């Protein structure tokens, strides 16, 4: 199905305006000629043009307030002034920012006059002049002055960034026969982005995922995503600049989303140097999983002002330290939500070494685990037996224990109290009552017989 053509282009609109003005001019000239010529009707011509100009201005003032979603009177006046500037050709850029992406017509931002920006609920931007930054604007309508421009835009949604090799590729393999030079260089660049070495000198690459957003609270700034002008300014103004790239290169200034994943990779390298390859994959449950420790520490470094210090062997200490990474992210207006080590990559030799280690050790560790499980079962069984004896003793002496110690009881009374206690114990446990139906009936008969014997005596 072919897309529908947009018939309401700028040129077609202006054609309609020129056509209407032309018809009015023809009617006015005809009216003047029929009433004695131009010289005798100068007052009529000027009055007609003045009324026409006044009516046009009133119509522009009235209808301009419906072109954009505004409520304040000052904003309505600004919209009207922008529309007058548009009619005179002295207007600035009119742009729409949706989900952190700038949508504009070709060469729109080259206009230097007063302009307007419409931002959806998930977008924000920073406005600047040629000399300084003016500040942040959030969801809604923003008005720019002459020579203003957009320094940068941000997406208020939660952001997901990943760094390291792709999950489906093998970064340690040499260049393939059908692989281009550019593809191979890109694969090696992704490998180097998260390359690290263990304490025993083994190279490991990680696929790291970072979830983050601007340092805002949902609902702040009249948007469900949260809008904090200070955080927006910090994110845009604090972007990194690559001085090795020319000024006209759009990649010279990095995106504000670049920093979190690269910080996570730096912390990953720092902590991996403290552990060995075997400590990353312990064979026994009793051994500390250093991979979990490293993952926990990375998130702590990026999301908390203080973190627990690890010693040179990757063990947690009782000391804490101020996190420079957290402080840097805070200064950039960024808040970390989660950091995950999704996958680790090794060379084929290391993978074979890990597989061999697992196959030669799994039987010993499985036997040890089986022995530990059997010991735990024995301990729990003895504990259960002791608890069952205590429960039975408590139930059997339920009535006997209520009798004062100084009261002398006959053998028959003691037996009767114990039997009543057994019946009470069975009644209190539905499972036991359903399992001991016959025994309960026999004990009840015994109790009746003792009662009869006691009565006959």
Image (tube, helix red, strand yellow):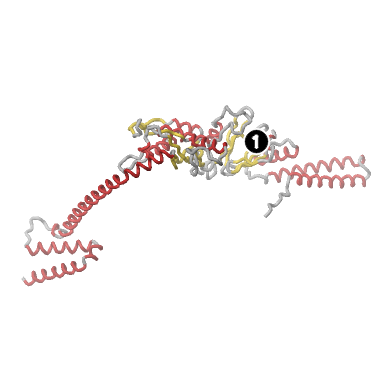
Of all residues, the one furthest to the front in this rendering is: 177
- Closest to the observer: 282 or 38? 282
Q: Quadrant of the N terminus?
A: bottom right
- The image shows residue 263 at horizontal and vertical percentages of 47, 34
Q: Circle 1 sits in a helix, a strand or a loop, which is it?
A: strand
- The image shows residue 235 at horizontal and vertical percentages of 54, 34
- Closest to the observer: 118 or 281? 281
Residue drawn 71% across and 43% down? 61
For residue 383, above or below residue 253: below
Within the image, what quadrant is residue 454 found in? Answer: bottom left
Other residues around mark 1 within 10 Å, as few (<14) / some (14–19) / many (≥20): many
- The image shows residue 419 at horizontal and vertical percentages of 14, 64
- Please state the total of marks drawn on the protein image: 1
Q: Which residue is mark 1?
A: 144
In the image, taking residue 110 as reference, residue 295 lies left or right, namely left
For residue 327, above or below residue 66: above
Residue drawn 9% across and 55% down? 405
- The image shows residue 353 at horizontal and vertical percentages of 38, 39
For residue 393, above or below residue 240: below
Residue drawn 71% across and 46% down? 63
Q: Quadrant of the C terminus?
A: bottom left
Of all residues, the one furthest to the right in this rendering is: 36
- Closest to the observer: 61 or 286? 286
């Amino acid at each position: 199905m072919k897309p529908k053509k947009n018939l309401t282009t700028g040129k077609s609109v202006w054609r309609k305006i020129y056509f209407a003005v032309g018809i009015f001019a023809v009617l006015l000239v005809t009216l003047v000629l029929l009433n004695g010529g131009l010289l005798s009707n100068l007052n009529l011509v000027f009055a007609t043009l003045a009324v026409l100009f006044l009516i046009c201005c009133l119509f522009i003032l009235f209808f301009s307030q419906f072109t954009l979603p505004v409520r304040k009177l000052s904003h309505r006046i600004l919209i009207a002034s922008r529309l007058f500037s548009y009619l005179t050709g002295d207007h600035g850029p009119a742009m729409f920012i949706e989900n952190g992406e700038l949508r504009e017509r070709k060469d729109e931002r080259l206009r230097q006059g007063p302009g307007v920006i419409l931002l959806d609920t998930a977008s924000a931007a920073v406005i600047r002049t040629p000399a300084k930054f003016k500040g942040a604007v959030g969801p809604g309508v923003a008005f720019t002055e002459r020579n203003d421009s957009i320094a940068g835009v941000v997406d208020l949604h939660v952001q997901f960034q990943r760094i390291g090799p792709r999950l489906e590729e093998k970064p340690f393999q040499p260049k393939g026969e059908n692989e281009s030079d550019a593809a191979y260089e890109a694969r090696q660049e992704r490998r180097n982005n998260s390359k690290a070495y263990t304490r025993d000198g083994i190279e490991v690459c990680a696929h790291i995922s970072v979830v983050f957003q601007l340092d805002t609270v949902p609902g702040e700034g009249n948007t469900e995503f949260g809008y904090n002008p200070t955080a927006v300014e910090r994110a845009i103004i604090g972007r990194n600049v690559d001085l090795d790239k020319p000024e006209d290169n759009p990649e010279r200034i990095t995106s504000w989303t670049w920093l979190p994943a690269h910080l996570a990779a730096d912390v990953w390298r720092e902590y991996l140097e403290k552990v060995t390859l075997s400590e990353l994959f312990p064979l026994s449950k009793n051994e500390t999983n250093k991979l979990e420790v490293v993952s926990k520490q990375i998130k702590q470094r990026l999301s908390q002002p203080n973190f627990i210090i690890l010693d040179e062997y990757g063990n947690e200490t009782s000391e804490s330290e101020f996190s420079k990474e957290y402080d840097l992210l805070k200064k950039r207006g960024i808040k970390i939500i989660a950091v995950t080590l999704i996958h680790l990559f090794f060379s084929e030799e290391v993978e074979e070494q890990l597989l061999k280690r697992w196959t030669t050790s799994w039987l010993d560790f499985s036997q040890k685990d089986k022995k530990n499980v059997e010991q735990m079962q024995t301990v729990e069984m003895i504990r259960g037996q002791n608890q069952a004896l205590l429960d039975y003793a408590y139930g059997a002496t339920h009535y006997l224990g209520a009798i004062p110690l100084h009261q002398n009881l006959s053998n028959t009374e003691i037996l009767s109290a114990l039997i009543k206690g057994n019946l009470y114990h069975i009644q209190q446990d539905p499972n036991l009552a359903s399992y001991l139906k016959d025994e309960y009936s026999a004990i009840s008969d015994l109790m009746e017989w003792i009662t009869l014997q006691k009565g006959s005596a």
